[in-house]
Amino acid sequence: MEINKKITDAFNGQLKEEYYASYLYLSMAAYFEDQNLPGFAGWMKVQSTEELKHALKFYKHIVERNGRVILAQIDKPKSEWSSPAEAFEDAYKHEQKVTSLINDLVKLARDEKDYAAEVYLHWFVAEQVEEEEQTRNILDTLKSVGDSKQALIMLDRELGKREK
């Protein structure tokens, strides 16, 4: 089943959002590198790579269904945060935004009776539950440790163990 223009345009828009997310998390990684928090930086680099993979999933789906991928300009991400907690607050808010965008795509797929797109999007719906949980848990931990440098160093070590 060929993909229609509305779905193609929406998926191209989401492809851009996934690239932006990758760019944002890479910017956060650079911030953490500057703050001498290599574990946080490593965690964000892994997250950035995951977002690239998500973008390529949208690319592949569009192409497989005989649609045309059109790449749009990616906005410059924020590059400074007042603290690791503020960075993870932004990450969590961004994941909530992406969840909303994915939900909008599911609704569009249903409205367009594009069942292939709807089924395809189920993976992203489940993925967003995980993405929000991960960032929220780290944010909650950062809030609970407050200004403790020792706790921050311990958390940095823990985040550095994330599988690449």
Image (spheres, rainbow, N blue to C red):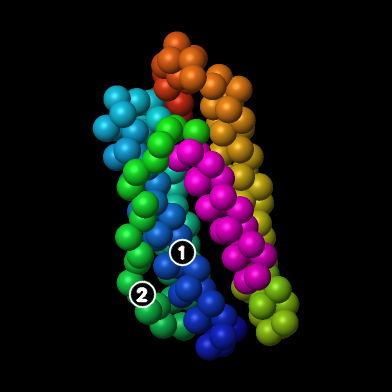
Look at label 2 and name its amino acid.
Ala
Q: Report the disc number at residue 72.
A: 2
Residue 52 at least partly seen: no
Within 10 Å of disc 1 (Cα), the crowding (few <14, some 14-19, many 20+) is: many
Q: Main secondary structure of the magenta part?
A: helix
In the rendered image, the residue lying farthest to the top is 150
Left or right relative to 74: residue 59: right
Expressed as whole percent of the image width and height from the top left, the position of residue 106 reads 67, 70
User: Whole-Å distance between the Cαs marked 2 and 1?
Assistant: 10 Å
Quadrant of residue 45 within the rendered picture: top left
Look at label 1 and name its amino acid.
Glu
Within 10 Å of disc 2 (Cα), the crowding (few <14, some 14-19, many 20+) is: few
Residue at 40% in and 59% down: 20
Residue located beneath label 1 in the image:
17
> Is residue 87 shown in magenta?
yes
In this view of the protein, which residue sits in the foreground, 1 or 79? 79
Expressed as whole percent of the image width and height from the top left, the position of residue 124 reads 60, 57
Q: Magenta stretch?
A: 86-105
Residue 59 at least partly seen: yes
> Is residue 72 shown in magenta?
no
Q: Is residue 152 above or below residue 18?
A: above
| Quarter containing the C terminus | top left
Quadrant of residue 52 within the rendered picture: bottom left
Q: Report the disc number at residue 104.
A: none
